[in-house]
Image (cartoon, helix red, strand yellow):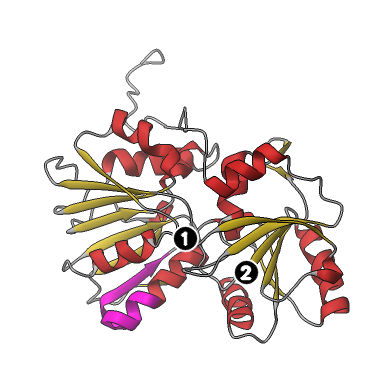
Amino acid sequence: MTNQSQRIIALLGPTNTGKTYVAIEKMLEFSSGIFGLPLRLLAREVYDKCVNKVGAEKVALITGEEKIIPSTATYFICTVESMPKNKEVDFIAIDEIQMCSDRERGHIFTERMLESRGTKLTMFLGSQVMENIISELVEGVEFEKKERFSKLSYSGIKKISRLDRKVAIIAFSIEEVYAIAELVRRQKGGAAVIMGSLSPKTRNSQVGLYQSGDVDYLIATDAIGMGLNMDINEIYFSNLKKFDGKKTRRLNLIEMSQIAGRAGRYKNDGGFGTTGDCETLNSDEIEKIEKHQLPDTKSIYWRNSNLNFSNPKN
């Protein structure tokens, strides 16, 4: 799988540029493929799209929670951690490649970026912040830049009671998500809740509840920033601080941009702002998010998987 002579394309750009759509279409042009995604929910979404196009007997879903693997499957839709490593396929895609810089999961994305190759085509999808690092580490990459389909603008600060329809509110703890959801239900009538900790069945039903229009508000953790294609007009942060596994810290510009960019899908313009007791975004941050001017990724995480156990020094 490490045949370096085949084509490698890095499809980079801000959110809502159709990168995932392009990669799905490209994969289905080949007779076999593996698609690695950062979220179970997103893997499910891509799996459903592929099933609609080529039929359930040709598509497998492999995540840490769900395994649907028909014996005739030639396309494997997976979370990045669950990508089969010993399967030879024509096409491999790795989505949200900027996750290489994530302290918890980055080493897995980096390993896939360095090692996983399709025999005919490999695609890296993600933010433009990764261009320099990819060009330094991977030989012969063709870069394709994608522009956002719609405009993203700052909507300001709004009280929850004043929020319009088709809005997502982002929180960073389970308690906060449920508290806001309860408030929205009391004031507005209905809200769907999306968090990584929900079971697949519950998560899928909550997505369905929102997408069908049964409820107009979505309360979610930052899991929503990872490429979920939902019909959201505006995104409001209820907090700009999150616990990252080690400490509580303020979101960086790339994380804010990734989440805010989920507002406005395809040709519909989107907005982002703050609500509740959230601190305000400063004018510099707002301008950079609106114009997608993000700092380049300077370092990524990697673990050596080829360890030498012959003696302690090695």
In percent of the image, x 41 and y 44: which residue is there? 109
Above or below residue 242? Residue 160 is below
Disc 2 residue type (three-letter): Asn
Q: Which of the two discs, 2 and 1, labels the residue nearer the N terminus?
A: 1
Residue holding disc 1: 16
Mark yes or no: residue 196 visible: no
Q: Position of residue 250 (x, y in %)?
A: 71, 38
Q: CA distance from mark 2 to mark 1?
A: 12 Å
Q: Position of residue 198 (x, y in %)?
A: 64, 67
Which quarter of the picture shows residue 84? bottom left
Quadrant for the C terminus, please.
Answer: top left
Q: Residues within 10 Å of mark 2 (few under 14, many from 20)?
A: many
Residue 272 covered by magenta stretch: no
Q: In the rendered structure, which segment of residues is drawn in magenta?
A: 49-62
SS under mark 2? loop
Q: Position of residue 95 (x, y in %)?
A: 39, 53
Residue holding disc 2: 233
Mainly helix, strand or loop, the magenta region?
Answer: helix
Numbered-mark total:
2
In-image side of 171 versus 285 (left or right): right
